Image: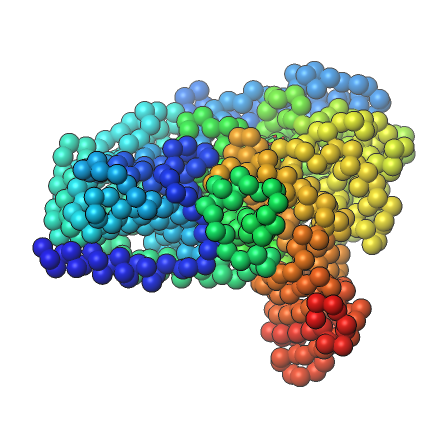
Amino acid sequence: MRNHRLTAAAALLALASFAHADGNTILWYDKPATDWEKEALPIGNGRIGAMVFGGVDSERLQISEKSLWTGGPGSEGGYDFGLPADSQADLMRSVGKQLLDGAQLKPEDVAKQLGRKMHNYGDYQSFGDLIIERETDGTPVSDYRRELDLDTAIARVSFKQGGAGYRREYFVSYPDQVLIARWYGTSTQKLRVKFAVPDNRTQQVRVAGDGLQVTGALKSNGLKYAAVLRVITECGSVTAEGDSLRVDSECPITFVLSARTDYQMKYPDYRIAAGDPATIALIENAAVGKRKFMALAIVHKEDYQALFRRVALTLDAGAPRMSTDRLRAQYGSGDAAADRQLEQLYFQYGRYLLIASSRAGSLPANLQGVWNDKATPPWNADYHVNINLQMNYWPAEVANLTETTPPLFDFVDSLVTPGKLAAQRYFGANGWTMFLNTNAWGYVGPIDWPTAFWQPEASAWLAQHFYEHYLFSQDTEFLKKRAWPVMKGAAEFWLDALVADPHDGKLVVSPSYSPEHGPFTAGASMSQQIVADLFANTSAAAQLVGDKAFAKRVDEALAKLDRGLRVGKSGQLQEWKADIDDMKEDHRHVSHLFALHPGHAIDPVKNPELAAAARTTLDARGDASTGWSRAWKINFWARLHDGDRAHKLLAGLLHDSTLPNLWDTHPPFQIDGNFGAAAGMIEMLLQSQSGELNILPALPKAWNKGSVSGIRARGDVTVDIAWDSCGASKLVLATGHAGPVALRSSLFEHAFDASVKTDGTLASRHFMAKRGGQYTFTRAASAGCADH
Ligand code: FUC
């Protein structure tokens, strides 16, 4: 008995040293969570997500698995990917022509003609709940702490009760594809463990030895699922009792949960061809075998930290002294250091959430990342492609997390085949397209929500991510094999689908609908800007892959394309081809500034008059909005080089659109705001969309001192920046590829020293980088900065 106690105590000590002590990357609370959305803490490995509540007597880990979706193939009544059997092209052309002729069509009327009722679209599902009930003596609890350590991707719970200490650790391992929980106690722990699933599925529970299995299929579509749990402890007992496992042990207890479905991201069946999810889950669980917890944790930590630790941001504020819910609640009330602490934490949380909800081998991050506790979540917890899915991936490249992009690229690839049918049925066009939203089942048709359903620009917008991945990585293999087919297909679609406006002969999109705002017109600015962006990227990519004939076709169309960039009578960037903007309108979508961000046709240096118009538009729309809209506006203001305004939007997001667990709220919880804001914070520090590396382009006064390292610029450059109230004081560039680099920074306005690690040659603000080079620029002491 004494030996066992010693084991537990030694384990607690070992854990104390295992924990990383940097308070800048820890979310912590002094109470258990009761509210899933606002308080529970998310962990995940891209495919499996869990929300940790940290209850003292009853612990709940609400589990999600990315592919557990109702609807789609196998549903009663069939599934058609959102596509009608017959061609709608004539109808679509007739609506497009009426609009070109100046007709005013109500969205409801257009939706009646071109919209379609969603049929077996489905919903993302909760996988179930791992419930661990504890026998306690009911004495008071002290020293309670629940935390999420972003540096290790481990959630922890600790408390004292009845003279004993308890500690729990949770993580979801990407290398091992299992959720691991570990419970320590300095006194015996008596637990009852079960796995509960919602009742919209069949379920068979098998409990034997130290294992518990729940298998079955969704009633909606027959999608099979399997959860396999094993409870391991080196002393005491684990026994079956009804549908639960009973644990009685003085030693640390390890829980291993694997979760699978028979989903496969593959049109048209979306099922694995052979094999059973239960077999896969059993194999994954058994593979963990007798490996020690510490060994599993180290593999997890190494995998995660290889991504997470690449980027550090400090706003020179120190570590928070208050719990994260308090830090958030008091944000903006005058404690500048605490405000900076929350901003640093929020930035790294965005990076954490992307790693936790998007890793190779599963679906991309949806509206809720990977976390969902409902059978009918808001907007089906799907993939909206008129901003939201795209926004999820804005931080991926700039925040040095390119490994999080494969799910997006695999997903888009899987949409190309059904997307070709969408292009044919709705436009009689080649290439591929899709509309407002999609699910796990290749849904590519329009829905019937009048003020949002018509969004055929979605494929062009998604194609931008492929080209950007090339720009950041300079990976020509990726460009040829992955990006080119997707981009070319999206461009082929628009080459066929654009129509000439009889008023000026320019090529326009018609029907066209400014996202969720309308009205229906021909050539809304957003439509034109997205197609222009696609054509410009496709033309450049065509040169690189050597398809000169296609480059020529695209260039000819681009020359005739209306670019959607007009300054209207109020000085605004027009939302439509006609100057009809209502300057009192505060709609959350500001899609007609696509050309400012994520596009780059509007640039305050190259075309200041368009930038000024964008500013007027943003002033008119106002700063208050929903979560993701505020996040987009951070990026807009950063691109306009207005750091204080970008920071004001960030402050508004943190103050009004952020929950105690730091999730973004639309409301309700929607993860795009977390990702969009993290990306926006980088846009404030570094931009590279205009052919040069702009250092600190939008530094707010509030960030008067700080440093960032490991962020990425186009051209395969990794950038570290230190700054103070005089601007950049030190820059370090690591260049992965050879090529020209142009820098824009206030550092070059004063005396500076430059050094090059590789060969000792001095570099200036324009230089030819070497592959694997490292270039350092430091403000000279003689620069005469007051801070110096
Ligand atoms: C877009 C937004 C809505 C919501 C939905 C998921 O349609 O306009 O506000 O965020 O996505």
> Nearest the camera: 611 or 486?
611
Left or right: residue 404 compared with residue 636: left
Please name the residue shown 21% across and 33% down the image.
205
Residue 159 visible to the viewer: yes
> Looking at the image, in which quadrant does ligand 1 appear?
top right
Residue 436, quarter of picture: top right
Q: Position of residue 208 (x, y in %)?
A: 15, 40
Instruction: State the count of labels.
Output: 0
Q: Residue furthest left?
A: 1
Name the residue at 55% across, 60% down.
312
The image shows residue 447, relative to residue 11, as above or below, that is above
Asked which quadrant contains residue 506, the reply is top right
Q: In front: 522, or 658?
A: 658
- In the rendered view, does 101 fall on the left or right side of 510? right
Snapshot colouring: rainbow
Where in the figure is residue 423, as x and y percent of width and height? 64, 34
At 30% from the left and 44% from the top, the residue drawn is 142
The quarter in which the N terminus is drawn is: bottom left
The residue shown at (84%, 36%) is: 572
